[in-house]
Image: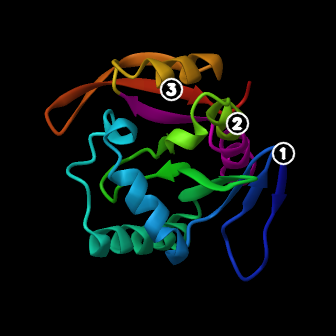
Amino acid sequence: MRSDSSAASPVPVLRSSRLMLRPLCVADHASLLAMANDVDVTRYLHEGPPPSAEEMLNRVTRAIGQWERRGYGMMAVEDVSGFVGRMGVFQLADDTEPLLVYVLCRSGWGKGYATEAVPLILEWMRTMHGTEQLLAHIDPRNTASTRVAAKLGGFRRGTVDRAGTMLDLWVFPTKR
C-alpha cells in the first residue's frame, strides 16, 4: 500500500497495483448517481429508493464532511478506466462503531477489486486510527460480498436489523 496525503486534505489517497482510492468529490456526482440507479448494483444495499440528483449531491457533501469530523469516510475507487465504485468507512452520528462499506459498479465486478482495495482501508484505519476491527452489514443473499468478506479474514458475528431487513454482521480484523 502506498498512501499519499497533503496537509491541505485529511483524506489519504491509497494505491494498489491496479487501483486508486481517492477522496470523493462533487465531480463524482454523476457516477455515483448512475451507480445508485443500477438495480443490480443496489439490490443488496438497503439504502432506500434511488436518490434524486440533488439528494446525491447532498450525500457527496455529507461524505466529504465526515472526513472533516471523524478523520475517515468514503472514497472513490478508480482503475485505469476511471470510477468503478465507492468504499470506505461510514459512521452515522448515533452509531458507536464505524462500518466498512464497499460497492462496485458492474464494470468493476469479477476483477478482484474489492479484495484488493479493502485491505488498503483496513491497514490505513489500523495505522492512522488504531482501529482493531471494522464491522460490515452484509445481506446474506449477497454471496459475492460474503465471499470477499471471508477471503479477507472477516467472520460473521450474528445479525442486525437494518430498516426491517435482517443482515449479517461481519467483523473485519484490521491485522491479518
**Crowd around label 3: few <14 · some 14–19 · many ≥20 (10 Å):** many
Q: Is 159 on the left or on the right of 41, as rendered?
A: left
Picture coordinates of residue 120, whole percent (x, y): 72, 43
User: x and y percent of residue 11 in the render?
Assistant: 66, 67
- Identify the residue shown where x is 59% and y is 58%: 76
Separation of disc 1 and disc 2 at Cα?
Answer: 9 Å
Looking at the rendered structure, which numbered label has been put on residue 1?
A: 1
Comes first in the chain, label 3 or label 1: 1
Of 71 and 39, nearer the camera is 39
Mark-to-mark CA distance, 3 and 2: 13 Å
In the rendered image, which quarter contains the C terminus? top right
Left or right: 76 as drawn, with respect to 17 = left
Residue range in magenta is: 119-138
Q: Pinpoint residue 7: horizontal percent, then vertical percent.
A: 77, 79
Describe the element under mark 2 as helix, strand or loop. helix
**Is disc 2 surrounded by few (<14), some (14 to 19) or many (20+) residues within 10 Å?**
some
Which residue is the site of mark 2?
119
Q: Amino acid at mark 3?
A: Val
Q: Which mark is residue 171?
A: 3
Q: Amino acid at mark 1?
A: Met
Q: Residue at x 45, y 34 (%)?
A: 136
Q: Secondary structure at mark 1?
A: loop
